Amino acid sequence: MNGKIYLDNAATTEVHPDVLEAMLPYFKAQYGNPSSIHGMAKYAREARERARASVAELINAEPKEIYFTAGGTESDNWALKSVAFGNRSKGNHIIVSKIEHHAVMNTCEFLEKNGFEITYIDVDEFGIVDPDDVRKAIRPETTLISVMYANNEIGTIEPISEIGKIAREHGILFHTDAVQAFGHVHIDVKRENIDLLSASAHKLYGPKGAGALYVREGVKLEPLMHGGAQERGTRAGTENVPGIVGMGKAAEIAKRDMDERIAKETELRDHMICRILEEVPFTKLNGHSTRRLSGNVNIAFSFIEGESALMLLNHKGVFVSTGSACASGSLDPSHVLLAIGLKHETAHGSIRFTLSYKTTRGEVDEAVDAVKEAVGRLREMSPLYADHLKIGTNKTEV
Amino acid sequence: MYDGVYSAEVMDHFTNPRNVGEIEGASGVGTVGNAKCGDIMRIFLDIDEDHVIRDVKFKTFGCGAAVASSSMATEMVKGKTIEEALQITNKAVTKALGGLPQVKLHCSLLAEQAIHAALWDYAEKNGVVIEGLKKPKSDIGDHEDH
């Protein structure tokens, strides 16, 4: 192993050195509780508010529309449960896409158990939601539409402004899980008619355990946590000040560097996709070629199973992730890959590579070489590949 | 990352699998599993007139545990008589691998089934009856769920 090549940045990222530096004082010298009355609270409070402004600025929101949470999952839970229960007298119907993250999917399952009706909207072969399908699913009792900004597995960027427009026209609240998009894509909550938006710090070179929920002014927010008066009485519990400061700093850097990061990552992403598709036979890109997060590469490799590929790559110091069931302990592969129409066996052989602003061309090339070797080796021992070569069957082809 | 999940034996048999390949004109070939579920195992046996397994090869589509189970199972049946091979259970394969995670136990079962399927194929081709051997219940595409 020459070193590690980390291509799992959609799972989590390395904290940016400036972010870490910004956080450190709030563990030591400025450890005050923002709710205290004395002098120690002042700096913590001010730091929290600066962070709120940075987060707001990144998505063109107002600082008072930002509520800090413990991460994307909490933000998703809060948004869905708050709108669902808070508008129960108006209706009990919610519309979401079929490729939402489990934080939304499993919250929907919980809401279904509590008497809500959920419509799950199909996506096309690229993972794109058709806004017209959303429009058709609207009923008089619909209170919420939730469609993710960009998908965590295949990187597809959804037509958020079109869906936002439809929701606004119908007077329905629109939430977007922007955990993968926040700071990676230009988001404008005003222009895109977004009422609620979930964000996380650790997907953006910030710390784990820090996130935010944007709630447009005028939208009623029910508390998820009951207790103290933090976040204007909507989210009780002493704030994770260092985490919030880290999120603010990460947002500030993202605002400054986003265009440069997107340009660099897009070039490397496309280089990686081209090399794999050209140099490894029986492969297919999962997701859309251009309407895609700049750091996301997801490839289906026929005749092999993802977990074993992951293990071989791990052995070479290349860290990736897979949609195969074998990596998750269940027999069903990723719901996202099945939703875009992949066969089970192809979904089992899909691998996700996610880049960061630090990823180099040398790392990408080394990773592709390792992939070629791993895939070649696994195909050599694959009965599906042997059958394909013998019979030329189309049965297992992508 | 996998150090805490798989034993050293599993890692060894996964990274250096024994007996990978095919046998031309094998005495018996058995394929079990289902691509839909992410595991397919195929075992080739070369059995001599004294009912001894002279050679064995495998091909597997599946996770690390499936590859390691195939590799270990082939090592365990090599040089054994048919009767001895029949006694090798999924538990024995799991034990020899130093254990498998709960969710991967079906991989060792697949290895046992693949050997039985190959023995069944041999018995059918040669018109012999192997006592205690049942017709393999699963083959490619035979089942949608397991």
Image (cartoon, rainbow, N blue to C red):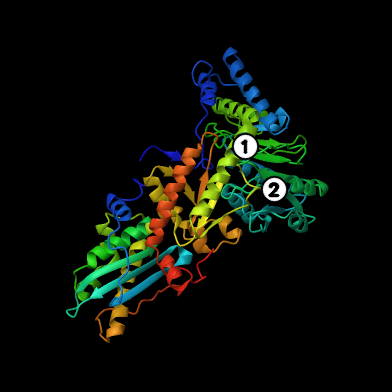
- Looking at the image, which is closer to me, B3 or B31? B31
Q: Position of residue A188 (x, y in %)?
A: 73, 37
Residue at screen point 19% across, 70% down: B80
Q: Position of residue B104 (x, y in %)?
A: 38, 58
Q: Secondary structure at mark 1?
A: helix
Above or below, comparing residue B13 to residue A45 in the picture: below
- Disc number at residue A302? none
Q: Position of residue B66 (x, y in %)?
A: 36, 60
Q: Looking at the rendering, in which quadrant would you find the C terminus of chain A?
A: bottom right
- Answer left or right for A173 relative to A202: right
- Disc number at residue A263? 1
Q: How far is the residue under mark 2 from the one under mark 1?
A: 39 Å
Q: Looking at the rendering, in which quadrant would you find the N terminus of chain A?
A: top left
Residue B135 in view here: yes
- Determine the residue located farthest toward the top in the rendered image: A39
Of marks 2 and 1, the one in the foreground: 1
Residue at screen point 32% across, 52% down: B15
Residue placed under numbered mark 2 in the picture: A84
Q: Position of residue A204 (x, y in %)?
A: 57, 34
Residue B103 in view here: no
